[in-house]
Amino acid sequence: MNAELLSILLPAWCVCVLIALTHAPLGISVLQRGIIFIDLAIAQIAGLGMLVALEWLHIDAWWISQLLALSFACIAAAAFHWCEKYFNQYQEAVIGCSYVLAASLAVLALSHNPHGGEALNHLLAGQVLFVDFTQVLSHLPIYVLILLLWFTLPRCRQGLGFYAIFAAAITSSVQLVGVYVVFASLIMSALATVFLQAYKAKLLLAWTTGILSVSFGLLVAASMDFPAGPMIVLFYGITAILALMLSKSFQS
């Protein structure tokens, strides 16, 4: 592996591992709550916030688009929390409808942009190989804070705290790796743990699955000149299936 390729892969690998470590406990909690598509919905809504800043408000400042994306995600998270309390029977339907509405608004926001199709593809599939260490370092405090809150203040995992943490994580992640990898890192790694009972065992397996997925996904994408985001998702699926098979065989 030459130095130029390593300089591209290393920051991409670092950010994907950060996301895998942060999303694993969130994904396990999402499965336990039975709100599988909340990550897709909030990721799409956060992405819509970025598109509004760029396409409608014509704001190029990174921190303003970040703030707008986070605001959109937090409003959605608060709405989903309200649904959980007062509209629980139909919460998943509301989440699904929110995703479709946000996706449709994103298409409309880009409808007059000659490069709209490309921008929409970047939102969904991501541009992880274009991530540099400046972006890694700028998002690092967010992921560190999320992990600290999650493991030192268990109350943050409940109620509105869970939704706020989730919104903050998704807002950063969707900008770095796209909607598809966000979903895979949350749900596929968590699905790999369903045959395990102990929380620590679930967490260790989800982390292992995530790290292996992003490592092999990035290597294969770079060596075969494939898009990195979809390749990472593919390996999340492969490793999740293998982990399920292994964990089930050990229990038999």
Image (spheres, grey):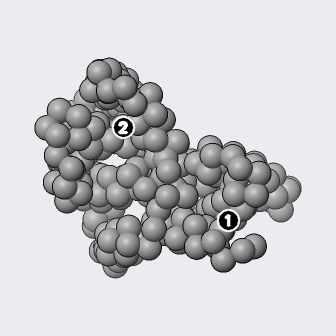
Q: Secondary structure at mark 2?
A: helix
Q: Position of residue 240 (x, y in %)?
A: 70, 52
Depth check: give the residue in front, 20 or 8.
Answer: 8
- The crowding category of the residue bearing disc 1, from other C-alpha atoms within 10 Å (few below 14, some 14 to 19, many at least 20), is some
Residue at 17% of width from left, 32% of height from top?
56
Q: Is residue 107 shown left or right of residue 198?
A: left
Q: Which residue is mark 2?
A: 44
Residue at 14% of width from left, 38% of height from top?
57
Work out whether residue 191 can be spotted: no
Q: Which residue is mark 1?
A: 215
Q: Position of residue 22 (x, y in %)?
A: 45, 65
Evaluate if marks 1 and 2 touch, with contact meaning CB atoms under 8 Å apart.
no
Residue type at the position of mark 2: Gln
Residue at 17% of width from left, 40% of height from top?
58
| CA distance separating discs 1 and 2 | 25 Å
| Chain-order first, disc 1 or disc 2 | 2
Q: Secondary structure at mark 1?
A: helix
Name which quarter of the figure residue 82 lies in: top left
Work out whether residue 14 can be spotted: yes
Q: Is residue 80 shown left or right of residue 226?
A: left
Above or below — where is 139 with respect to 51? below
Q: Is residue 12 shown left or right of residue 97?
A: right
Q: Position of residue 119 (x, y in %)?
A: 41, 36
Q: Position of residue 197 (x, y in %)?
A: 62, 61
Q: Residue furthest left?
A: 57
Mark seen at residue 59: none
Residue type at the position of mark 1: Ser
Name which quarter of the figure residue 155 lies in: bottom left
